[in-house]
Structure formats: structure tokens, C-alpha cells
């Protein structure tokens, strides 16, 4: 559906007049057709964006036989779908993906990973994939283009992911400078690829620095009561950690609550850093330091790569988005 321009809509003809080219050239530039010079194609696309042009989903679907629909789902597919809605990271990924899809003339719909994807769609975006997940394998068998937010071992899917080596080093260097000698990595029990990546780089950093590598996965960590009890046991046990690097919002909030229950001061007795930001994390009793993952950018990148596969028959590719540490009171000594 075309965008508003003053009192009317921006059409292909409007873009053609502004770019001083034919409407056929505009159409070919936006749809990846023809044999235009790349400079021309990019100039027309830039002018179309500046004018606020949006292609008609209905018209393009009739021409191409496509649905104009992209599906986004949360993996791993064995995780309770209702729990995932409690993590702000997923909401931010979906927001970025929805904006990019809309700007490219596609509709984005959300589906639980457990659902049989019988509704016709042009492509699939999977967030936090697990290696060898059956949903990705099934999409590959159907010939459905796929992109993932998180690394995948599927050669048929594009992926966008954070620079976990840089992220982990930045966090642990910060904690060490602040005086930590006994850091611990705490993650949910999940096959999601980001957990494997963070664990790998955490172990490598500790080995390089001569620090004991201590990490734990907590089953049922999406449930606050379970997370709280598990973290309390860790902090109340022998040789407790002096810093927690946490891989889930619920675990970070539980860690702060459990520490206070035990009379531990944050950050004096225990420092906290969480992977991913959110309103509850930022406004906790002691605001929690975080790794900003740029989730909206990740969602947008996943859509761009997916649409390139759909419209341009592009080969799957990879993109790495740097994360960065945001230091708050929970780790600021």
C-alpha cells in the first residue's frame, strides 16, 4: 500500500518523476529485476525511501504469486511459548522486524514454534535457533527461505548475531577491573545458540586470565520462583561468586532479590551484569548493568536478508552486530 504524500499517495510515477527515469526502471529497481546499473538501482531506491513510497502488497502478490507474508517465531521449539513473551529482547526483535517488513512491503505475523506452519508464507525468521532444530530442517525441506537471529548450522539460512567474543571479553574485563576474582556465568537451561557461544567465550577468557571457569545452567529459569531459589542456593553456598554474568532477565532480577535476602550488598559484595536490556532491568532496586544487543537492528537485518533471498534469489549470508556494555549501579564500584 502506497504511503501518503501531502493529500495523496506516493506512486511509482511520483518516484519516476523525482528520479527522472521511467516507471519500468523504478519497478525494476525496487523489485531487483532487469539489468540496471547498480548505481541507478541504488539511486532510485534511495529516492523512493525519501519520498515515503511503499509497494502494494496486494499488487505485488498478484504479479509474483507470493503471499507477501513473513512468519517470525521463537526458538528453541521445546521452550514454553508463554514464557518467551516475558523477555523484552524478543519484543524488541519483533518490533524491528515488523518495521523493516512494512517498509519493504511485507506483512509480519507471529507464530509459536510448536505450530504447524500450514498457512502460506514467503519466508521464516527464527529467533534464538538451536543447532539442528527440526523447524528449520522442515523449512529447508519445503524450500522456504529462512533467516535467523542467532547463529545456525544450517547452510540454507541467513543469520544475524552479536559479536559474542567481544561482548564476553568486555563484560569480564569490566568486572575484573572492578575487583572481581570469582565471576560466574549463569544461564537458562536451553539449547539456544547464544548460550553455547557465551559459554565458549567465557571459558576461553577465564583460561587466558588464569581464572577458574565457573558456569551453571538453571532449568525452569523463566519462572521467577525457580530462578530465585536457584540463585539463592548459589550465593549461600561455599565459595560464592563475587560477580554474576547472567543470560536472562528473570535470572538477573532473581539474583538481585536473592542477594538482598541474604544481606549481600550490590555492587559491594556482588556485581551483576545481564545479557540484554529491559525496563524491569533498568528500573530494578539497584539498576542492573547490561549488554545492549541492539535487538531492533537484529530484527531488521534478519528481514533484509530474508527478503533478499525471496526477491533476489540471494545466497544466504551472515551479519555480525556488535554489542556493548552499559554500566549501571549493579557493577559500578
Image (tube, rainbow, N blue to C red):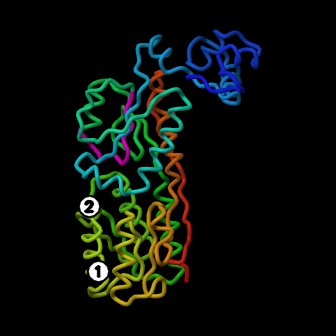
Magenta stretch encompasses residue 129: yes
Magenta stretch encompasses residue 298: no
User: In front: 5, or 68?
Assistant: 5
Q: Position of residue 299 (x, y in %)?
A: 48, 43
Classify residue 234 by image quadrant.
Answer: bottom left
Q: Residue at x 64, y 9 (%)?
A: 24
Q: CA distance from mark 2 to mark 1?
A: 17 Å
The span picked out in magenta is: 123-134
Q: Which of the marked residues, 2 or 1, is nearer the chain's N terminus?
A: 2
Which disc number belongs to residue 271?
none
Q: Position of residue 257 (x, y in %)?
A: 37, 78
Q: Position of residue 230 (x, y in %)?
A: 26, 74
Mark 1 neighbour class, 10 Å CA radius: few under 14, some 14 to 19, many 20 or more: some
User: Which residue was labeled with disc 1?
Assistant: 232
Q: Is residue 298 above or below residue 186?
A: above
- Where's the C terminus, which quadrant? bottom right
Q: Is residue 38 above or below residue 271?
A: above
Q: Left or right of 309: which side holds 82?
A: left
Secondary element at tag 1: helix
Q: Left or right of 72: which side holds 105?
A: right
The label nearer to you, 2 versus 1, is 1
Which disc number belongs to residue 189?
2
Q: Position of residue 162 (x, y in %)?
A: 48, 52
Q: Is residue 206 above or below residue 10?
A: below
User: In front: 209, or 240?
Assistant: 240
Amino acid at each position: 500500500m502506497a504511503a501518503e504524500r501531502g493529500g495523496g499517495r506516493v506512486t511509482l510515477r511520483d518516484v519516476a518523476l523525482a528520479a527522472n527515469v521511467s516507471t519500468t526502471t523504478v519497478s525494476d529497481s525496487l523489485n531487483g529485476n532487469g539489468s540496471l546499473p547498480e548505481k541507478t538501482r541504488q539511486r532510485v531506491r534511495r529516492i523512493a525511501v525519501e519520498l515515503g513510497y511503499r509497494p502494494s502488497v496486494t499488487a505485488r502478490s498478484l504479479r509474483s504469486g507470493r503471499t507477501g507474508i513473513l512468519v517470525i517465531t521463537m526458538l528453541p521449539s521445546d521452550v514454553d511459548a508463554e514464557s518467551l513473551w516475558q523477555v523484552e529482547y524478543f519484543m524488541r526483535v519483533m518490533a524491528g522486524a515488523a518495521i523493516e517488513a512494512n517498509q519493504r512491503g511485507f506483512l509480519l505475523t507471529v507464530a509459536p514454534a510448536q505450530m504447524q506452519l500450514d498457512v502460506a508464507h514467503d519466508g521464516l525468521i527464527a529467533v534464538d535457533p538451536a543447532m539442528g532444530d527440526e523447524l528449520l530442517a522442515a523449512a529447508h525441506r519445503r524450500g522456504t527461505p529462512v533467516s535467523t537471529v542467532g547463529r545456525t548450522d544450517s547452510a540454507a539460512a541467513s543469520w544475524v548475531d552479536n559479536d559474542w567474543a567481544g561482548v564476553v571479553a568486555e563484560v569480564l574485563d569490566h568486572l575484573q577491573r572492578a575487583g572481581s576474582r570469582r565471576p560466574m556465568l549463569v544461564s537458562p537451561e536451553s539449547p539456544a545458540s547464544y548460550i553455547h557461544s557465551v559459554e565458549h567465550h567465557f571459558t576461553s577468557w577465564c583460561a587466558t586470565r588464569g581464572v577458574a571457569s565457573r558456569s551453571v545452567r538453571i532449568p525452569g529459569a523463566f519462572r521467577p520462583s525457580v530462578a530465585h531459589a536457584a540463585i539463592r542456593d548459589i550465593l549461600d553456598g561455599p565459595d560464592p561468586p563475587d560477580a554474576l554474568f547472567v543470560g536472562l532477565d528473570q535470572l538477573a532480577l532473581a539474583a538481585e532479590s536473592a542477594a538482598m535476602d541474604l544481606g549481600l550488598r550490590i555492587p559491594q559484595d556482588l556485581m551483576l551484569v545481564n545479557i540484554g536490556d529491559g525496563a524491569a532491568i533498568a528500573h530494578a532496586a539497584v539498576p542492573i548493568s547490561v549488554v545492549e544487543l541492539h535487538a531492533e537492528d537484529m530484527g531488521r537485518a534478519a528481514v533484509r536478508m530474508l527478503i533478499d533471498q525471496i526477491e533476489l534469489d540471494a545466497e544466504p549470508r551472515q551479519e555480525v552486530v556488535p554489542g556493548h556494555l552499559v554500566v549501571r549501579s549493579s557493577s559500578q564500584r
